[in-house]
Image (cartoon, helix red, strand yellow):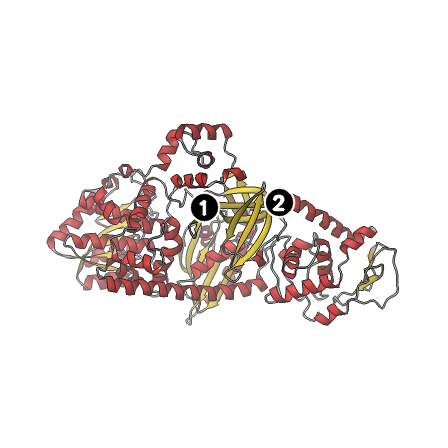
Amino acid sequence: MRAKRWVIASPDTERVRVLSRETGYTPLTAAVLSARGIDTPQAAADYLSCDVRGLHDPFGLTDMDKAVEVVREVIDRGEKMVVYGDYDVDGITATCTLVDYLRSKGAKCEYYIPNRLTDGYGLTRPAMEQLYEQGTRLLITVDSGITANEEIAVARELGMQVVITDHHECHENLPDAQAVVDCKRTDDTYPFSSLAGVGVAFKLICALEGDTLSMLDRYADLVALGTVADVMPIVGENRIIVAEGLKKLSVTANIGLEMLLREAGMKNRRLTSSTISYVLAPRINAAGRMGKAELAAELFLTKDPVRAQALAAELCEQNKLRQNEENKILEQTLTRLRREYNPLEDKIIVLAGEGWHQGVIGIVCSRLCDRYGCPVVLISVDEDGVGKGSGRSIGSFNLFEALTSCEDLFERYGGHALAAGLTVQADRIEELRTRLRKYAETHVTMAELVPQLHIDCMVQSEWLTQENIESLSVLEPYGMKNAEPVFCMKNMTVEEITPLSSDRHVRLSLIKDGKRFSAIWFGIGAGGLGFVEGNTVDAAFHLEINEFRGRRSVQLTICDVQLSDCEHLADQKILNLYNTLMQDGPLTAREARLLLPDRKDLVAVWRHVTCRAEDGRLSVPDGALSRRVAWEADATLTSASCLSVWTFFRSPDSSVIISRKACSTFCSNPTRARPIFPDRLSLPHCKAWRGDTNGGRIYANETGFFDRTRTKTKPAGEYQEDSRGIRMCGQGT
């Protein structure tokens, strides 16, 4: 995982003190607010308000009056209407919310959700024709339709009325529908433009009912579910909706939602926006990704507890299948990237594979994007030679504009700055890769690809009390534009490292000012850490109260850990010494002894590599290898001797590179001393090394085979290399 650049806010101490005194918030909470530019009591009250009276009049949305009139007329005439949704959580919850309400008003209402794998995204002409033939006279879109001008025109020609509700960006020319309700319309004066698709559908319900509060009480759970899952800003109306929805979620009247909570093991547990993001949303999305979105829709609409339980179990099973497909594709891509990706040069990743599941590659894109810190495009090629791709990007690189520069290669494409989709013929993929690489080369720098971690403030150990942490709850619910606070503490000593779940996660014991803190780091194992027990580190983290067997304690949930300045200084001294060695500079006897590894050092590195290397490559965080080897082997291996071992592990033909990142870690001049692990080097070679630590001299040739047969001597304490490539290190007595 690419190292992050910390951006630490420094809230004004006096403003924090005043805000804390005038609002009653703890200094920790006041510091977070101040760091986010909210430093007056009124601004804090406005920002944190979850008062339902802050919801706006739904008729403030352009065309809402027209939409209400059309829907009511169709209900009165007894004609069939269809809600046309989308296969993600936002689309499914919008569909179910509107269908449930309309049916409760006596409407002849059905729903249609396109199949992700066969229909693709949005409205299609065949769907319009099919729905009309089935007797549909009113089509209501939710979370879609705003750019479907041609498809809407087909529906109108067939004789259907159309009401569009959407929240996506609009084109200059709107579809020719009876009503177009979209908070992103350029001519819309509605005070809040960040509603989710389900949020706009909810506003239609409120307008039809004429009572916003009763509708909020009835549907807040589903609306909150779609809003959080679609990563909408949790401010303004969304904050009110999500806050109310989380309250309703634990006592939901929706049988399907209750069964899903039970099946996911979340019944009777504290529910937060994270519950939606990491527990509920993946299970609902899995249905759409696997081409079975109707399972989720039926779950939220059924009134039968037995059927709801079966559907909830099926959603969880679909999620497991999704995870299996995701992991399979991820492993395939990682294997290829270990051979093909150069972190020092490549600014974008473009990979294609045959038979990759189209509904899953988007998630894999996101994971690779997080892992490598650069834009990623994955393309699944079917048996007909058609590639359907998905891409994800980072803030500094506009993926949609990058694809636009290659639009002549696509059959179709679309998206926005951070995510996009495309269709391309297989024989054009290589040209696409080349052009995207050239585009990235001129539109983004390596520095811009370094991911940033925004930290609200540095804290002192005495601030981390249960009372202070509990006070942060006034900031909830968290989400986009109201992220869970991130804090940091510097110069913490790593007391203990405990791998969890087969080294998928790790628990840390950290000490600061004599106080011990328990920390957990998800998604990284001990083998991937850049530090070991005894190191001094800076930690960035979320704060929470851990409850276990009736005991409550402060817990840090780690976002990132970096070596403290003192550790970097020590490493730099070693690197300076190593540079002297690599440049054939003179070394003192003490320096030579420090750099000279003995046999156990070589064996420790060898064993580590054979266990950890994948496809002949070993990827490690900066500065981490010697620490990891020493910790795992329980051996005393210094950074200096580890550097020397890597020098011995060079291959003349440079056939197998462990990693260029490791190269930059252990060699200040990677082109001069690239760490190579030769296939032919074996344990007997290690055993052949008989280093004399009492004054003898050790010679190593370029294959890593250590030769003591030569008698040529050099002055004690000096390192030199002759024309035959024989390395010599004299150890003074």
Mark toward the start of the polypeptide (1 vs 2): 1
- Marks 1 and 2 sit apart, C-alpha to C-alpha, by 24 Å
Q: What residue do we see at 55% from left, 65% from top?
A: 336
Q: Is residue 316 above or below residue 276?
A: below
- What amino acid does circle 1 point to? Glu
In the rendered view of the protein, which quadrant contains the N terminus?
A: bottom right
**Res 204 seen here:** no
Disc 2: which residue = 564
Mark seen at residue 544: 1
Picture quadrant of residue 727: bottom right
* Residue 379 locus on image (x, y percent): 46, 63
* Residue 690 locus on image (x, y percent): 79, 66
In the rendered view of the protein, which quadrant contains the C terminus?
A: bottom right
Q: What residue do we see at 40% from left, 66% from top?
A: 321
- What amino acid does circle 2 point to? Ser
Disc 1 versus disc 2: nearer the observer: 1
356 on left or right of 195: right
* Residue 166 locus on image (x, y percent): 30, 49
Q: Assign a secondary structure to mark 2.
A: loop
128 on left or right of 625: left
Around disc 2, counting alpha carbons within 10 Å, would you say few (fewer than 14), some (14 to 19), or many (20 or more)?
some
Q: Assign a secondary structure to mark 1.
A: strand
Residue in front for this viewpoint, 487 or 709: 487
145 on left or right of 615: left
